Image: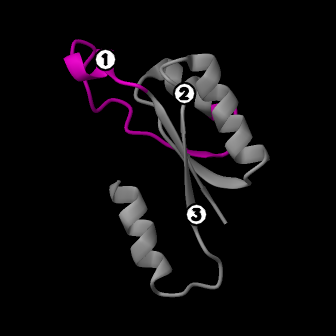
Amino acid sequence: MAFAMAVEDYAAQKPLRPVIVRHADDKGDLDAAEGQAVRLVTLNHALALLGGTSAPDVIRLDRAGSLLLSPIGQRGQNDERSRDRHRTVAGATR
């Protein structure tokens, strides 16, 4: 949500190239995460991906071949939130 708000603030300045945020929820499946990341980069021409909260997440998202921004390392392995979360892949396109 904060990412989308930052993009809206940037867009209010009327830049030469618009920035679009696209979200793809993989429902917690690593294969789906990798597929969504590849789709965002290949079809939507995403310049960067934001996502991945574990090493396996990051490895799979990195295969899309785009800049990857990840908060990896922010939560511990035993954190209840990290066990029950769904991974969300977001791509910024121009």
Count of numbered circles on the image? 3
Let me know if residue 37 is in the magenta part.
no
Residue type at mark 3 is Ile
Q: Secondary structure at mark 3?
A: strand
Horizontal side of residue 15 vs 76, given as left or right: right
The x, y position of residue 29, in whole percent, is 54, 17
| Residue located 65% across and 27% down the image | 34
Looking at the rendered image, the quarter that the N terminus falls into is: bottom left
Which picture quadrant has residue 18? Answer: bottom right
Say which residue label 2 marks. 26
Residue type at mark 1 is Asp
Q: Mark 1 and mark 3: span between their CA atoms?
A: 28 Å
Dot 1 or dot 3: first in sequence order is 3
Q: Which residues are magenta?
A: 62-86
Say which residue label 3 marks. 20
Q: Which secondary structure class fits the magenta region best?
A: loop
Which sits in the foreground, 76 or 41? 41
The x, y position of residue 69, in whole percent, is 49, 45
Q: Is residue 72 above or below residue 16?
A: above
Q: Secondary structure at mark 2?
A: loop
Horizontal side of residue 78 vs 6, given as left or right: left
| Residue located 38% across and 32% down the image | 72
Q: Do the residues bearing badges 3 and 2 touch, measured as CB atoms within 8 Å?
A: no
Which sits in the foreground, 18 or 52? 18
Q: Secondary structure at mark 1?
A: helix
Residue type at mark 2 is Asp
| Residue located 40% across and 29% down the image | 53
The x, y position of residue 55, in whole percent, is 47, 21
Dot 3 or dot 2: first in sequence order is 3
Say which residue label 1 marks. 84
Residue 65 at least partly seen = no
